Amino acid sequence: MSIERRVQLVEDLFYQLDQESTQFQKSSGISCVSACGKCCTSPDLEASPLEFLPWALQLFLNGEAEKTLLMLTESNSPTCLIYKPLSISGQGRCGNYKYRGLICRLFGFAANTDKYGNLRMATCKIIKEGQTDNYNSTAEAITKGMPVPVFTEYYMQLNQIDFNLGNKILPVNKALKMALEEVLHYYAYRSFPTDLKKKSI
Ligand code: SF4
């Protein structure tokens, strides 16, 4: 399948999740703390290359893919390369929010299935401790059937777009690197997609 088609399907999946997630945030009353970004700095953050394919294509169209690939190759930091710290007090934000990955869209506002098949909300300590009442009532409501995005369901849908790039779960910077390599290899022997570039301006 072409890069353009895969990117379109990943973006369609993101759109579906954004709708579901907005609804969930409205009904749960749970929200991220402004300028938090703490989850982006986790050294254990993992993602698949496929969820960053739209990000990689965008960089390629803007002529920034090679430069970013070099930065990823030379960096030893486990923190997501896209993350932009705002202060030494630990605040920060995503440097390319529109093109963030699936994990970034799910974490905080989605549920995992436990070993008994029950849905359990997966969120951070800051939300659990700072919005305890909302967190507890939402966790309870989920056990009674409140609609919530589910990690495994979204990752299964992602795998169906491209099993090879969707099923690999890697440290986030390795996932970013592989997404860029995929785009650069793909266009190495193809002409530059001028029509896509025009659409993205
Ligand atoms: S892509 Fe953006 S939201 Fe996702 S981990 Fe990196 S900085 Fe955070």
Image: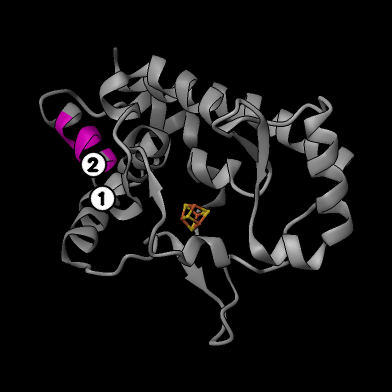
The answer to the question of whether label 1 and label 2 lie on touching residues, with beta carbons closer than 8 A, is yes
Q: Can you see residue 11?
A: no
For residue 91, above or below residue 94: below
Residue under the point 72% across and 36% down: 21
User: Horizontal and vertical percent for residue 47?
Assistant: 39, 43
Chain part drawn in magenta:
179-185
User: Horizontal and vertical percent for residue 63?
Assistant: 29, 48
User: How would you classify the magenta stretch by its main secondary structure?
Assistant: helix
User: Does the closest atom of ligand 1 sit within 8 Å of the Cβ of label 1?
Assistant: no
User: Horizontal and vertical percent for residue 31?
Assistant: 78, 54
Horizontal side of residue 188 vs 192, given as left or right? left
Residue under the point 38% across and 49% down: 46
Give the structural element (helix, strand or loop) at label 2: helix
Characterize the local packing of mark 2: few (<14), some (14-19) or many (20 or more) Cα atoms within 10 angstroms: many
The residue lying toward the viewer, choosing from 37 and 110, is 110
User: Horizontal and vertical percent for residue 65?
Assistant: 26, 48
Give the structural element (helix, strand or loop) at label 1: helix
Residue under the point 41% across and 55% down: 45
Which of the labelled discs sits on residue 174, or is there none?
Answer: 1
Instruction: Kindly give the residue lying farthest to the left in the view shown.
Output: 189
Horizontal side of residue 15 vs 71, given as left or right? right
Q: Can you see residue 90?
A: yes
Tell whether position 136 is magenta: no
Which of the labelled discs sits on residue 178, or is there none?
Answer: 2
Tell whether position 180 is magenta: yes
Residue under the point 39% across and 21% down: 159
Question: Identity of the amino acid at label 2?
Answer: Met
